[in-house]
C-alpha cells in the first residue's frame, strides 16, 4: 500500500519528466540520438522504483520540507565556532521528515557512486549528513533529529550510514556523528 504522497509523485512523474526531457538537450547542450529515447525510459523506471522504495522506507514519516536552504537565496549562513575559528556553512537539505511523535530525520539524495558507509564519515568524507542533522536540529530548530541517511536514487535504497545507528568512541546516534563531523 503506497502513501498518498508516493501516489501523487508517481502520477506526476511522466508529466514532469516529459517537460524536463524536452528541455534537456538545449539546457545540457547535447543533440538527442536514438539512445536518448532509451535513456529517458530508463530514467523514469529508476525514478519510479526509487519513489516506491523510499515510500516503503517511510512508514510513519511525513515530509515537512524539501530543499531546505541555509546560507543561500538571501538566507544567513549557519555559523559554527570551533576553537577560535568561525566556520560559515551554506547548503540545501534535500528532505526533512517528521515522525508522528515529532522526531525528525534528514535525507540527502545521491545519484552518484560512493560507498556512503560509516567508514566514509570516520575518514572525513561525506560530512553532509551530520551537518544537515545539526542544522535542522540546532539552527532551524525543526525538532530532535533521530535519524538521517543518504538515499541512493539509482539503487533505490538508503545508505549503510545512518545517523540513528552511528557509533564512534563509545558514543552513538546523531550526536556521535555530529561530534565526529565537527572534529573533521
Image: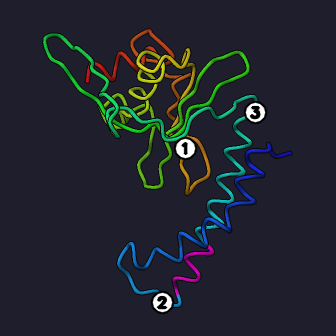
Q: What secondary structure characterizes most of the magenta part?
A: helix
Kindly identify the residue that appears in the image at 34 percent across and 20 percent down: 180
Task: Report the Cα–Cα distance between label 1 and label 2.
Answer: 30 Å
Q: How crowded is mark 1: few (under 14 residues within 10 Å), some or many (20 or more)?
A: many
Q: Mark 3 points at which residue?
A: 59
Circles 1 and 2 in contact, beta carbons < 8 Å? no
Residue 5 is situated, as x and y percent measured from the top left of the image, at 74, 45
Compared to residue 159, the image places residue 48 above or below, namely below
The residue range painted magenta reads: 35-41
Kindly identify the residue that appears in the image at 56 percent across and 22 percent down: 164
Kindly identify the residue that appears in the image at 36 percent across and 37 percent down: 91
Compared to residue 56, the image places residue 165 above or below, namely above
Q: Residues within 10 Å of mark 2 (few under 14, many from 20)?
A: few
Residue projecting furthest to the right: 1
Q: In this view, does 121 lie to the left or right of 4?
A: left
Q: Mark 2 points at which residue?
A: 33
Residue projecting furthest to the left: 84
Q: Which of marks 1 and 3 is nearer the N terminus?
A: 3
Is 26 one of the magenta-colored residues?
Answer: no
Q: Earlier in the sequence, mark 1 or mark 2?
A: 2
Circles 3 and 2 in contact, beta carbons < 8 Å? no
Secondary structure state at the residue bearing disc 1: strand
The quadrant of the rendering that contains the C terminus is: top left
Q: Residues within 10 Å of mark 3 (few under 14, many from 20)?
A: few
Circles 1 and 3 in contact, beta carbons < 8 Å? no
Kindly identify the residue that appears in the image at 70 percent across and 30 percent down: 61
Q: Name the residue under label 1.
A: 151
Looking at the picture, tell me which residue is in the foreground, 44 or 90: 90
Amino acid at each position: 500500500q503506497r502513501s498518498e504522497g508516493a501516489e501523487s509523485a508517481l502520477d506526476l512523474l511522466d508529466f514532469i519528466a516529459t517537460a524536463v526531457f524536452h528541455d534537456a538537450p538545449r539546457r545540457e547542450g547535447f543533440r538527442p540520438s536514438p539512445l536518448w529515447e532509451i535513456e529517458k525510459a530508463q530514467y523514469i523506471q529508476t525514478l519510479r522504483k526509487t519513489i516506491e522504495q523510499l515510500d516503503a522506507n517511510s512508514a510513519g514519516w511525513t515530509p515537512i520540507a524539501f530543499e531546505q536552504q541555509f546560507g543561500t537565496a538571501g538566507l544567513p549562513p549557519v555559523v559554527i565556532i570551533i576553537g577560535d575559528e568561525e566556520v560559515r556553512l551554506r547548503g540545501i537539505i534535500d528532505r526533512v521528515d517528521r515522525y508522528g511523535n515529532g522526531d525528525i530525520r534528514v535525507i540527502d539524495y545521491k545519484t552518484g557512486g560512493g560507498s556512503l558507509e560509516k567508514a566514509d564519515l570516520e575518514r572525513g568524507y561525506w560530512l553532509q549528513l551530520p551537518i544537515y542533522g545539526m542544522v535542522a536540529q540546532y539552527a532551524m530548530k525543526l525538532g530532535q533529529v533521530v535519524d538521517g541517511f543518504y538515499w541512493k536514487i539509482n539503487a533505490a535504497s538508503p545508505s549503510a550510514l545512518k545517523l540513528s545507528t552511528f557509533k564512534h568512541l563509545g558514543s552513538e546516534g546523531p550526536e556521535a556523528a555530529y561530534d565526529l563531523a565537527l572534529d573533521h
